[in-house]
Amino acid sequence: PGEQAELEGRIRELLARENAALVAHYYVDDALQSLAEETGGFVGDSLEMARFGARTEATTLVVAGVRFMGETAKILSPEKRVLMPTLEAECSLDLGCPAREFSAFCDAHPDRTVVVYANTSAEVKARADWVVTSSIATKVVRYLADRGESILWAPDRHLGEYVREVTGADMLLWQGSCVVHEAFKAQQLGELKAEHPGAAILVHPESPEEVIAMADEVGSTTQLIRAAKERPETELIVATDNGIFYKMQQAVPDKTLLEAPTAGAGATCRSCAHCPWMAMNGLRNLADTLERGANEIHVDPDVREAALRSTQRMIDFAE
Ligand code: 13P
Ligand code: SF4
């Protein structure tokens, strides 16, 4: 505890010294989320993180999350220095959609509007017409479908199938998935629900279709926290990375939050749904990054320019 307080104190000083804002995702360590809030930074979902990074007056952004979040910040704010506690925090969706293969896939389907999830590299965003996050994917696709456009969607197949189901759009799907959400299992979820029949089920749309089918609410991390507040139930079963419990429990201190079960979970840890890459962000590497100005995100200027078009469309659409 003494060491943690010392590190937190140092980070506060360094954030001020560097005119830096800490922008954290809900899936990172609680200590980073609370520091981001207390120091005038931000905690939010992927879309809100991108929007905050673009509007803050800080000249350095320290993004506690995974690499695509740092790259998105840099794409939107090239004049800002973007640092991350580690450059090794990947995402299985990003890794599963290499730019060269993706580009060939797009070339094979030139008539389709290319919509990619934010969980992709800058190169993949550069090839896309639109970037979306889970909070606005359905709205954007419905808007495009209403204009008669057919869609090439990448990389998350579960989110893609969910959006297709909701909108009825013609969507061709890349077959990527999130290692964390893919592990949620409908059968075990049904058993937990049978034990808690009064509980509402909140599900992130990167989860498998049969899990989404059991949901009372489907949405981005921020949307799920909002739903936790608005739902009348006092017990909530939550199918997303368990990093979200820190802010969700603060939002609903009187409600009981239960982790949705994952495959292979044992008796002591029913779910254990936690992203190994998000978990690489800690107080120590955050302090070190700020101290040394290390782990800076760079995006090739040509790639950035192309990626900005598709990413800015998302930001403008969300206004
Ligand atoms: P949102 O925070 O936008 O819901 O996305 C979750 C995610 O994929 C982060 O890893
Ligand atoms: Fe990627 Fe899933 Fe980790 Fe989010 S939780 S960063 S989607 S692997």
Image (spheres, helix red, strand yellow):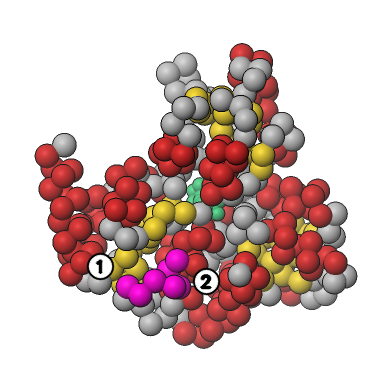
Q: Which residues are magenta?
A: 52-58
- Choose between 56 and 94: the one closer to the eye: 56
Q: Measured from the top left, where is residue 123 in percent x and y?
A: 55, 73
Residue plotted at (35% across, 44% down):
29
Tell me the quarter of the picture where residue 294 sits: bottom left
Q: Is residue 289 above or below residue 107?
A: above
Residue 184 located left or right of residue 265: right
Picture disc at residue 294: 1
Specify the amino acid type for callout 2: Ala
Q: Is residue 66 above or below residue 144?
A: above
Q: Does the magenta portion include 57?
A: yes
For the residues labelled 2 and 1, say whether their Cβ atoms are less than 8 Å apart: no
Q: Secondary structure at mark 2?
A: helix
Residue plotted at (32% across, 73% down):
58
| Mark 1 burial class by Cα count in 10 Å: few <14, some 14-19, many 20+ | some
Extreme residue in the right direction? 148
Q: Quadrant of the N terminus?
A: top left
Q: Quadrant of the C terminus?
A: bottom right
Residue 75 located left or right of residue 106: left
Q: Measured from the top left, where is residue 312 in percent x and y?
A: 58, 76
Q: Secondary structure at mark 1?
A: loop
Picture disc at residue 122: 2
Residue plotted at (39% across, 75% down):
298
Q: Measured from the top left, where is residue 107 in percent x and y?
A: 74, 75
Residue plotted at (62% across, 67% down):
318
Specify the amino acid type for callout 1: Ala
Tell me the quarter of the picture where residue 113 sits: bottom right
| Mark 2 burial class by Cα count in 10 Å: few <14, some 14-19, many 20+ | many
Picture disc at residue 118: none
